[in-house]
Amino acid sequence: MEKIKTFIASHLDFKVYPVTWIAIIVFLLIVPCVKFLPQTYGYENGLLENLQMVTLFAGVFLALKTKVNKKFFNFVAMVLGILILREVNCGRTLFFPVPGEVNTFYGWKDIKYGWLAHPLYGLYMTWVGLYFLINKQFVTLWQYVKNIKFPVWNVILMLVGMALGMYAEKAMHDMVAEEITELLFYVSLIGIIYLYAFHKNFSLENKSEVSENNV
């Protein structure tokens, strides 16, 4: 029991931060959105997906803007780039709609040189992985896991968004439900990135200063 208390005290942060409130608001909007919004809001390039893209680009901006652990947050920005490309299917849903059809897009096999899309996407993901390994950012990641608390509510809301999104996609076949829960996932994730990139409670530098002062 004592070990559990020690783990909670040293690894879990139960504070509700402003970025957490944003995720909470999105969570509370899930049921009203699913109940009242027409399915068109969940279409590709619709309102909810556009909000997801704004959220992801905000995350890239924050990751690149931070002054701490630049290489690690460059990696974070690259991972968000993977998610952005995934959302627009590497540009297919932006540039190749089927004329006269609603929420329908040409497949890569129907597009000139479309066969290059998946290999190039795979090469980008490989490059991101190599960047992580070559720059030894697994060391920085481990330092965060070992020394910095987890923002509990943001993590929980992120996992809830992930779980509900998978359920909406597989069981409900409801586009609004799928997109609003995916938005919850992204908002919670970007909130976590913001905290680790800018908030003093989640800074490795502050942790190092405390450790040095205790020596």
Image (cartoon, rainbow, N blue to C red):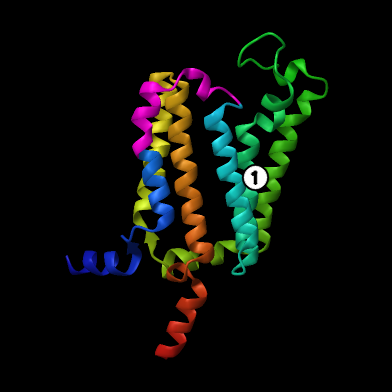
Question: Image quarter for residue 214?
Answer: bottom left
Majority SS type along the magenta span: helix
Bounds of the magenta span?
A: 28-44
Q: Residue furthest top?
A: 100
Q: Position of residue 211 (x, y in %)?
A: 43, 83
Local packing at callout 1 (Cα closer than 10 Å; few below 14, some 14-19, many 20+) is some
The residue that appears at 43% across and 22% down in the rendered structure is 37
The residue that appears at 34% across and 63% down in the rendered structure is 13
Q: Position of residue 120 (x, y in %)?
A: 75, 36
The quadrant in which the C terminus is found is bottom left
Label 1 sits on residue: 81
The quadrant in which the N terminus is found is bottom left
Taking depth in this image into account, of 59 and 162 the one nearest to the observer is: 59
Q: Position of residue 183 (x, y in %)?
A: 48, 37
The mark total stands at 1
From this view, report whether residue 190 is shown above or below residue 203: above
The residue that appears at 62% across and 39% down in the rendered structure is 84
From this view, report whether residue 215 is shown above or below residue 133: below
Query: Is 75 left or right of 39, judged from the image as shown?
Result: right
Question: Image quarter for residue 8?
Answer: bottom left
